[in-house]
Structures are given as C-alpha cells and as structure tokens.
Image (cartoon, helix red, strand yellow):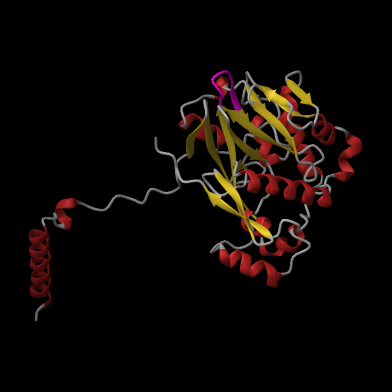
Amino acid sequence: MPIDRRHAMLGSAAAAVALATGLPAQAERGPLPPQMGPNPPRFLRMKLGDFEVTTLLDGAMQGTNAGIQNFFPDSTPEEIAPLRARAFAIEAGLHQPVGAYLVHTGRNLVMIDCGGHASFIPTTGNTLAALRAAGYTPEQVDTVLLTHIHPEHALGLSYDGTTRNFPNAEVVVTDIDHRFWTDPAMESRVPQGQRFIEAARRAIRPYNGRIRTVEMRRDLEVVPGIFLDPAPGHTPGHVSYRLTSQNQSMLIWGDIAHQVVIQLARPRWRVGVDVDPAMGVESRVRTLDMLAATGMLMGGVHVPWPGFGRVIRDGEGYLYVPRPQQFF
C-alpha cells in the first residue's frame, strides 16, 4: 500500500476514534503544553486549638552513600539496607527535607527555625517564598525561635550577614547554644568545622541587640503558649518547642531525628555530627518515649513533608505515622 494512502487511512481511523469518544482530535487540541518543571513554593496549614500552624518547605539535603557510615557510626551497610528498603527509599545516600514552621497564635506570628540558603546548601533557601505564598510577609513575623544555630535552620535569618530577612523580629535561642556558636573558645568542639561556624555567625549577626537568649529550662514559656523542651546533644543548646492551645499540644523538634525511618527504628544509634553523641541518644529516646506515650502531634525540620505526624512504638524502636491532611 502506498505510504500516503496508509497515512490517510490512519488519520481517518484516529478521527473516527475521536468522533466515537467525543474527544477532539490532536490537531484540534493543539500541541501539548510544556511540562511545568519544579514545584512552586509549598506550605500546608492546620489548626491546633486557637493556633494556626503552617509548615513551609525550604528545600532538601542530599548526602552521599559514602557519608552514611560517618553519619551513623554504629551502623553497618547490612543493617541500613533493610531500613531503607522498608521506606522504599530511592535516593542515593541520605536524603532529607528541610522545613520550617509558622505559628499564628492570635497574639504573635512566630517562626520556628527559618530554613537555609543556596549559598550553603544549593537545594535550600525557599522559606521566604513559601511564607509569602502562604499569605504572609517577613515583616509580619515578630519572633523567630531557633532550635539551634545550624545553617539549614538559621540562615533564613540573613543570607548576607548584613540584611535582616525578618526586619521586625526578635530572635530567641538558648544562652548555651548562642555561646557555643559565638565564643571562639568553643570552635574546636564543632564537628562540622569552620564553614558551619562562619554560617551560624553570618545568620545571627544582623540581629545584634534583637537576640533574646533564654535559659535551657523545661517548660519555659518563651512566647505565650509556646514552651521550651531541652534536647541537648546535637548541639549543647539544642531544644524542641511545645505548642499548647485549648488543651491541644504539638511538639516541634529541630534535629531529634534527621532520618526518620532509620533513627526511629534504631533510636540508640549515635549520630556522627552530634557534639555529644551519647547525650543526643538520651534526648532522642526521651522525646520519642514521651511522644509515643502521649500520642502528641509532632513535627520536625527534617520530618517527611508535609511535616505533621505522630510517633508510635514499633518493637524495640518507633515508627513515624503521617497525620492525614486537614481540609476543613
């Protein structure tokens, strides 16, 4: 059969199918639009009593396979593999999201951590865009609570070490953590070295005179309805924050766990980037025990997006259970 006649018959067949199904032919629809590319800034809101809590996705971090042993010095490849397989992990190395939390209490607009910046980790730095997409501006934030002064938690304060990204905000951090990152005598204790030290100081430098250092004391109310929960080890002044409104509570942690699937299953494995790994284990186990016993809602900077869930016991370890999305 001549090629032109075959094409004509195929075209007629396609037109007949379109006619039968009621769908327009390709020529009538026009060319397909281009694929959309990266996701726009992302956020998700939920109610907690009278509070409104919004997760803001800052980006993600990607480690290498070679770094797994350094991150989890107590592990072996044979132990890591089934934990990753159980989570259907597809990324090489250790992949983790980076997020932040915005809390509207009715009296205050509070950030808990504020993300990183592409100058330090290229795949971070979207918190301000997510904040604006959620309907707020950085100028409206009156308080930034830091769990600790690591770059992917604090560089959202200032990208250049000069400009305050939250120009009207007070920054709250434990006195222990502030001293750890600003005292030259402490520099030798930072496992990640000078690059982390310089980034931490760049983040907080523009807020001199606007930093409130607080005692690392359990149940200290740092903002009405928001209480401090000490969790030292990852850094000396690392903390979580408990939100409480109308008899409802939620705990937001910083780095109790970076890799939820692995660290909840093996909570007593030390973390190589902790300043005090043994103390980090104590803080993690205590926090997970409390969450599993109470059923309290929780979130965390490196918890799988969208960052709301609960912790339950699972054999000798724990399991993270994402919270179903709240639509109304």
Q: Which residues are magenta?
A: 104-110
Q: Is residue 21 left or right of residue 239?
A: left
Any part of residue 203 in sight = yes
Residue at point 55%, 46% (across, down):
309
The image position of residue 268, as x and y in percent, is 76, 57
Q: Please determine whether, in this image, residue 203 is positioned above or below residue 29.
A: above
How many marks overall?
0
The image position of residue 293, as x and y in percent, is 65, 47
Q: Is residue 261 left or right of residue 172?
A: left
Who is closer to the viewer here, 158 or 302? Answer: 302
Q: Quadrant of the N terminus?
A: bottom left
Residue at point 92%, 37% (across, down):
185
Residue 73 belongs to the span the image colors magenta: no
Q: Tell me the quarter of the picture where residue 250 sits.
A: top right
Q: Is residue 168 left or right of residue 210?
A: left
Residue at point 54%, 43% (across, down):
308
